[in-house]
Image (cartoon, helix red, strand yellow):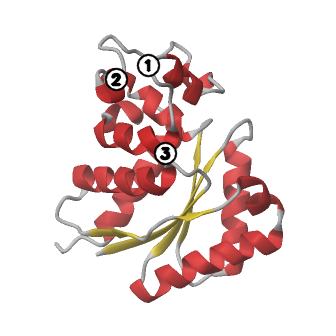
Amino acid sequence: MAFIAPIVEGHGEIDALPALLHRIQSVVAPATSLQVNPPIRVKSGSFMNNDTEFRRHVRLASAKAAPMRGSVLILLDCDDDCPAILGPRLLNQARAVRDDVPMFVALALREYETWLLAAASSLRGVARLPDDFVPPANFEDRRDAKGWFGQHMPTGYDPVRHQAILTRRMDIEMARRVPSFNRLYRHMAQLLDSRSPNP
């Protein structure tokens, strides 16, 4: 069995990330069981800029993962930061807190909803999205994927209400067009393969 203790920044990811990880597991390793601890939510600014807050939350997630021989997954929106710089920096910081627990940092470019936007055509009719819903041509460069969804939903987009619903229905292969999502996908495939019940 694989066990993951996540750290997230958004209210919507509390339900959406476990759903996403189980979706990936069902595709890459259906025979391997996966347990996802309820995500620990942090405020991105204080988590990344306050060492005390960063260490406290990484320790808490590690304390959940260690007894299960699991790992910690930190999922944050990358916004305008360079993931190639920010990701390794956060990973090194996390490993300095607990080097006995495997860590992985996933940075959504630019936000979690960018991953959903990549799979937009598979979400037609979901949560009252239009039947001809398609992503904008430059979906990876958009700074407000949440706003794009909101413009196409009669009642607007609410991450708490809609993020998990859309995550459960999105086409995983379409989402892999976004490098940051594909990196998470490949990490999960490797992790689950290492915990496969088959030799």
Residue at numbered disc 2: 128
Q: Report x, y in % for residue 183.
A: 48, 47
- Which label is found at residue 140? none
| Amino acid at the residue labelled 1 | Pro
- Lower position in the chain sequence, tag 2 or tag 3: 2
Residue type, mark 3 in image: Val
* Rendered position, 100 above or below 115: below
Image quadrant occupied by the N terminus: bottom left
Q: CA distance from mark 2 to mark 3?
A: 16 Å
Disc 3 target residue: 160
Q: Secondary structure at mark 3?
A: helix
Looking at the image, the residue that sits furthest to the bottom is: 67
Q: Quadrant of the C terminus?
A: bottom left
Would residue 138 appear left or right of 170 to someone viewing this image?
Answer: right
- For the residues labelled 2 and 1, the Cα–Cα distance comes to 7 Å
Residue 109 left/right relative to 196: right
Tell whether label 3 touches label 1 (CB within 8 Å): no
> Residue at left 22%, top 67%?
32
Determine the CA span between mark 1 and mark 3: 16 Å
Along the horizontal axis of the image, is 127 left or right of 183? left
Q: Which residue is mark 1?
A: 154
Kind of residue sitting beneath label 2:
Arg
Query: Which of 191 and 152 lies nearest the eye of the viewer?
Result: 152
Q: Around disc 2, counting alpha carbons within 10 Å, would you say few (fewer than 14), some (14 to 19), or many (20 or more)?
A: few
Q: Please say if the residues under marks 2 and 1 sit with CB atoms less than 8 Å apart.
A: yes
Q: Residue 125 versus residue 34: which sits nearer the camera? A: 125
> Could you tell me which residue is drawn at 42 percent across and 38 percent down?
162
